[in-house]
Amino acid sequence: MSHTLKTATVLVVDDALDSIEIVNQILQDDYRVLFALCGVMGLSIAQQQKPDIILLDVSMPDMDGYQVCRELKTNPDTRDIPVIFVTGKNEDEDQEMGFHLGGADYLTKPVRPATVKVRVKNQLQLRQNEALIMQQALYDNLTHLPNRNLIQDRLRYMIAKDKRESLKTALLFIDLDDFKTINDTLGHDVGDQLLVEAAKRLRRCVREADMVGRLGGDEFVVILAELKQIDSAIKVAETILATFSRPIVISDMEMVITASIGIAVSPDDGDNDKRLLSNADAAMYQSKHAGRNNYHLFNEAMNLNIKRRMVMEHHLRHALERNELKVHYQAIVDVKTHTVLGAEALLRWHSPKLGKVAPDEFIGLAEQSGLIESIGEFVLHQSCVYFQELNQKLTQPLFLAVNISPQQFRRGYFPQLVSDILKETGFNPRQLELEVTEGLLLAPQSNIKTALQDLRDLGIRLSMDDFGTGYSSLSYLRNFPFDTLKIDRSFIMELEQKPEDQALVTAIIAMAHALGLKVVAEGVENRAQLNLLATKQCDMVQGFLFSRPEPQISLKKQSGI
Ligand code: C2E
Ligand code: MG
Ligand code: MG
């Protein structure tokens, strides 16, 4: 067969080394021969190497040849590879079983070299003819992409697999904008070249494992398999739009062609191929209606949500350099004397496009996208500069509390970064307190404990933020070198009305004091809360009662307190 064009690959799966040796001697001059010494290995090599033919032993210890054949035939990647059983079993039933499972031929050991050669050659020849016919049946002639038959087949397979493995498959339905006009005015030749170029560009936007197909006309699909997050589908859609925006030159004519994309995700938007295709099509029409050169998800709620996040991430990327981020400060006050002892730095983002965005919304996004590293560094630097200047004017210096995300510990060595900033700004480490949440202590990095200890060795204090919302584990407080515990606002909010919250707060304070920690109550909004906290020996409070987060910290006491 094709070994005149390319050397065909034969995979021999057999647990007996001497059998392998014999077959190798027979075939090695004409073919590339691969081996597997057991069924599982055979399956994995077949999947990776896509041999042209497989010679398969039946009796093997881990998985017999019949089982291997069954698995080969259920996997679309390997099911068309002809399998010749080569075995010592020569009963009629054995042969029947082999053919029944989709085996192409059956040879009994001991094998004769001439027979092996001829049978292998026959199968490869047959396969080549079949491949030609298949090519016609499953691929598009013009672009050589999979056609509707193969697309549907693949979708069916992926959807079934996803069900078993709780994954998702995204289907992108792509329709070129104004293709008909081009075809009608410039001719079919130009139209065809455009489709071929579109196919090439689409292929470049996806991974090897993803499928790009042509449904017909100017309609293409992309199948993104085994997705964990639909965000990846959105990213591909955006890449496709960007790729198409580059002009295409055909017969010295430069044209720009855009596309409208609809996305449906299985199983949520359809658990069979037809439904998924029709829903992706419907989503594509939304893109057409919305002005083309655009993508839409089938699910409207998801559409809004994801688009907002994508838009937000895009703007957040530039927020720092465009000076849209500001640090505000909220006073932390002594419970009894009401003197301001320090303040917490809280980030504010005013985006010209999105308006004011709350930290609870954008900090998470910054953490996911990696932007938190530069943003966090900015907050630390900015607030140290401000506090250094402020403290020089005060007789009693204030402490500065800065929130740190777990991701900031990831790259480089975080204590070094902090120490550099302290040196550069001249800010006294003893007046710096870093607030972390329990999430940090759960992070898989092994260096967290050392990093926290190193920060402490620099003279910096550590505070456990939002206590009570996470695991609230006592052992964390014991095992890590904390100085302060901040009781989450959710326990303070209804403190006056809820005896159970009062009991909890009492217990937390007693425990913290027993461990030698100071306690700050967050979110104190009225006098009743303040008084209760004072009777419970809470050390400090923070909340709207004394001050909202402001661009500059106000040292004046709130009137009436
Ligand atoms: P957090 O560290 O627990 O900060 C306290 C939050 O409670 C702040 O919300 C503050 O404005 C709010 N708050 C304080 N007193 C009161 C009150 O009396 N009533 C009410 N209703 N709220 C009060 P904010 O500024 O929206 O920040 C939310 C969260 O975002 C922060 O919670 C913190 O986890 C995070 N965050 C803010 N800035 C940064 C930053 O620079 N870096 C990092 N990694 N996270 C930050
Ligand atoms: Mg905080
Ligand atoms: Mg907090």
Image (cartoon, rainbow, N blue to C red):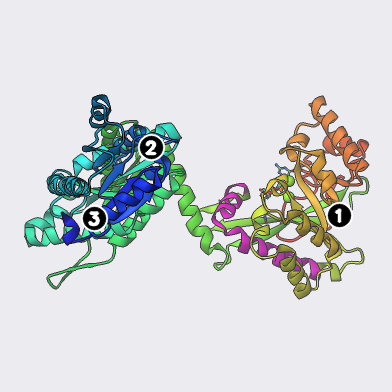
Q: Which residues are magenta?
A: 360-389
User: What secondary structure is the stretch in magenta mostly built from?
Assistant: helix
* Residue matched to label 1: 340
- The type of residue carrying mark 3 is Ala
* Residue matched to label 2: 299
Label 2, ligand 1: CB separation under 8 Å = no
| Residues tagged 3 and 1 counted as in contact (Cβ below 8 A) | no
**Of callouts 3 and 2, the N-terminal one:** 3
Work out how far the residue at label 2 is from the one at label 1, CA to CA, in angstroms.
50 Å
Given residues 447 and 358, the one toward you in this image is 447
- The type of residue carrying mark 1 is Val
Work out how far the residue at label 3 is from the one at label 1, CA to CA, in angstroms.
81 Å
Work out how far the residue at label 3 is from the one at label 2, CA to CA, in angstroms.
47 Å
Given residues 293 and 217, the one toward you in this image is 217
Label 2 residue SS: loop
Residue 8: image tag: 3
Residue 515: x and y in percent read 90, 44
Q: Viewer-nearest of labels 2 and 1?
A: 2
Label 1 residue SS: strand
Q: Is 20 one of the magenta-colored residues?
A: no
Residue in the picture at 37% in, 47% down: 18
Q: How many marks?
A: 3
